[in-house]
Amino acid sequence: MELLQSMRLFARLAELGSFTKAAESLQIGRPQVTRYIQELETSLGVRLFQRTTRQVKLTAEGERFYDRVKEILGSISEATSMFDRSGTTLGGRLRIDIPSAFAQIEFIDRLREFTKIYPEINLVLGVTDRTVDLVGEGIDCALRIGELPDSTLIARPIGMATMVTCAAPKYLHEHSEPTELEDLVDHRGVTFLSGQNNRTLPWHFSVDGQDRTYISHAGIAVTESNAYVQCGVAGFGILQVPGIAVDQYLTNGALVEILKPFRPQPRPVTLLYPSRTHLAPQVEVFLDWLQEHFPLLYSDWLER
């Protein structure tokens, strides 16, 4: 059992690249992590990590050992959890991350249903629009919308989100409603700034089946999606957003969809997680649960 614990500590340290982060992730003391790794290296007769004051990196021997350890831990996880899928005995911490646009009462209510099914699972919910480092920040899975950059993460498709272009009635009353894309030059938009470089995200429109992009004249620039929507509701200008994020405002009339004949192509909604082989049971059941329930929650705005 001690060898198994050492292997788990080794794998976590290899993934996080930090003794402190590995200790925090496993909720043990840092000296204990150091001792287990030193004993493991002694028993194997090889150096598994190169250590500096700034980083911890696998040696060539460590990389080969890590590949085998992942397979072993994955097999053990499958074997020990194969009778544990009914739900009530599953437990542990589950850290998830979602975009601000999805942090709405409907989604939170549905999460509450998940905790009733699995009461021993402790949810930690992160809400952010930035790109997160799942491994480095100890996040088990993340829900994301839009095209994804190439990475080593596992991506599980959830559906395709309908995008809408909309504005507040008071803005349209003051500036008139655009009916053609050429009319946008006379209008102001709510601009979304993305990433560390605050890159302006263009609007997309579908014209005869072809994608056409447009950068609006900014009435205001925003870096967070809930604030982005609220600026649209306040009348700062036109915005383009997933229908999921503005369903209540389209329903109550606070926003009105415009340029509907030019609706952009739907954008993918994806679940991201670090690995298939070393997946904790609570993570696996959540992935399956969310893939089933999320499209039903937003059936008007999400295509399977």
Image: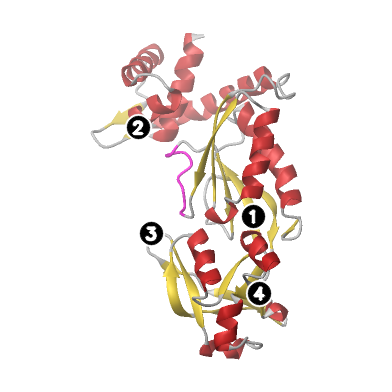
Q: How far apart are the alpha carbons under marks 4 and 1?
A: 24 Å
Secondary structure of residue under mark 3: loop
- Give the vertical position of 292 relative to 221 (above or below): above
Location of mark 4 (residue): 256
Task: Report whether residue 209 is seen.
Answer: no
Q: How far apart are the alpha carbons under marks 1 and 2?
A: 31 Å
- Give the vertical position of 290 relative to 190 (above or below): above
Q: How far apart are the alpha carbons under marks 4 and 2?
A: 50 Å
Give the residue drawn at x 31%, y 17%. Answer: 31
Looking at marks 3 and 4 on the same chain, the residue that comes earlier in the sequence is marked by 3
Mark 1, mark 2: which one is toward the viewer?
1
Residue closer to the observer: 70 or 293 = 293
Residue 242: image location, x then y, percent: 63, 63
Extent of the magenta region = 130-137
Contact? badges 4 and 1 (CB < 8 Å):
no
Looking at marks 3 and 2 on the same chain, the residue that comes earlier in the sequence is marked by 2
Residue 196 image label? 3
Amino acid found under the numbered disc labelled 1: Val
Looking at marks 4 and 2 on the same chain, the residue that comes earlier in the sequence is marked by 2
Location of mark 2 (residue): 18
Crowd band around label 2 with a 10 angstrom C-alpha radius: few (<14), some (14–19), many (20+): some
Quadrant for residue 159, please give it: bottom right
Looking at marks 4 and 1 on the same chain, the residue that comes earlier in the sequence is marked by 4
